[in-house]
Image (tube, rainbow, N blue to C red):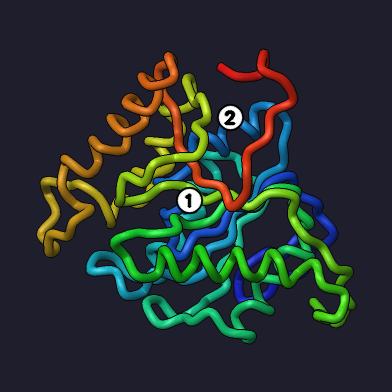
């Protein structure tokens, strides 16, 4: 291990799933129960935050970092990194794509999870397209990258899935996460600066209402209802979702 800017980077760790979020707490809100379930099945999962969420009305970059680390421990993910892109102002250009490609090649995930394709916050669809484009470019041998002075081999994830955020986008598939909602809620509420707190004197935002906090559970309940389970999380896919056979469907 090497210590860089107070972050521990674990070298040569292959992950099964790498989840990207434009801000700390995006991944937790979008797909934390799915991540918790995959980890329980023995999968190695990591999270990469694109920004520090420094433009958030409440809290600070430093506090968000601490909250993100607490959420990481709750979920049991193997690694969490922050790329330090400019909150609100990062763009889908070569410079930013290369930084994400470095993460993809470093951890070589089979599956990448990323932001919603369309959403209220401008960083969410931007982050969604940025990560998706980087996943494709990461598979090109003539796109050369180095990390810590070491040349990286090309790597393209087998699947890129987008979790659902503020908007109620129609999912292409849903995952039964019954039994894992407690971990999801705990990981979300690890960001105590961001969500409902009746004792807070800070300004109200669209995500600080009790209704928003409650929506994390009732959306999962509704998706679960539609497939006959208690809780579910929805995703969209960039290509057709294939199944091995009809008996694998819920």
The residue at 86%/81% (across/down) is 142
The spot of residue 121 in percent (x, y) is 32, 65
Residue density around tag 2, few if under 14, some if 14–19, many if 20 or more, within 10 Å: many
For the residues marked 2 and 1, what is the alpha-carbon distance in whole angstroms? 14 Å
The spot of residue 211 in percent (x, y) is 16, 40
The residue at 28%/30% (across/down) is 218
Question: Looking at this view, is 209 or 168 the one in front?
Answer: 168
Number of numbered tags placed on the structure image? 2
Position of residue 183 in the picture relative to residue 83 (left or right): left
Residue 19, compared with residue 104, is above or below; it is above
Position of residue 75 in the picture relative to residue 24 (left or right): right
The spot of residue 169 in percent (x, y) is 36, 46
Residue density around tag 1, few if under 14, some if 14–19, many if 20 or more, within 10 Å: many
The residue at 34%/59% (across/down) is 119
Quadrant including the N terminus: bottom right
- Judging by the rendered image, the residue that carries numbered circle 2 is 37
The spot of residue 111 in percent (x, y) is 69, 48
Q: Quadrant of residue 23?
A: bottom left
- Judging by the rendered image, the residue that carries numbered circle 1 is 27
Say which element carries label 1: helix
Say which element carries label 2: helix
Q: Dots 2 and 1: beta carbons under 8 Å? A: no
Position of residue 64 in the picture relative to residue 8 (left or right): left
The residue at 46%/63% (across/down) is 65
Mark sitting earlier along the chain (2/1):
1
Position of residue 71 in the picture relative to residue 135 (left or right): left
Question: Which label belongs to residue 157?
Answer: none
């Amino acid at each position: 291990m090497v210590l860089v800017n107070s972050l521990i980077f674990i070298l040569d760790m292959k992950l099964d799933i790498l989840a990207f979020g434009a801000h700390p707490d995006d991944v937790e809100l979008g797909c934390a129960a799915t991540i918790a379930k995959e980890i329980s099945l023995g999968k190695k999962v990591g999270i990469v935050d694109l920004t520090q969420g420094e433009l958030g009305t409440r809290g600070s970059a430093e506090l968000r970092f601490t909250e993100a680390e607490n959420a990481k421990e709750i979920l049991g993910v193997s690694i969490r990194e922050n790329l330090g892109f400019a909150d609100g102002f990062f763009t889908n250009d070569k410079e930013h794509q290369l930084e994400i490609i470095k993460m993809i090649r470093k951890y070589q995930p089979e599956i990448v999870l990323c932001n919603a394709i369309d959403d209220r916050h401008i960083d969410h669809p931007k982050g969604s397209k940025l990560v998706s484009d980087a996943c494709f470019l990461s598979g090109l041998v003539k796109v050369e990258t180095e990390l810590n002075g070491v040349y990286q081999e090309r790597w393209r994830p087998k699947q890129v899935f987008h979790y659902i955020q503020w908007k109620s986008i129609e999912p292409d598939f849903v995952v039964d996460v019954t039994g894992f909602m407690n971990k999801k809620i705990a990981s979300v509420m690890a960001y105590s600066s961001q969500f409902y707190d009746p004792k807070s004197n800070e300004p109200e935002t669209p995500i600080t209402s009790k209704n928003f906090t409650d929506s994390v559970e009732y959306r999962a309940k509704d998706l679960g209802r539609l497939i006959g389970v208690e809780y579910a999380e929805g995703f969209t896919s960039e290509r057709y979702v294939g199944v091995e056979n009809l008996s694998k469907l819920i």
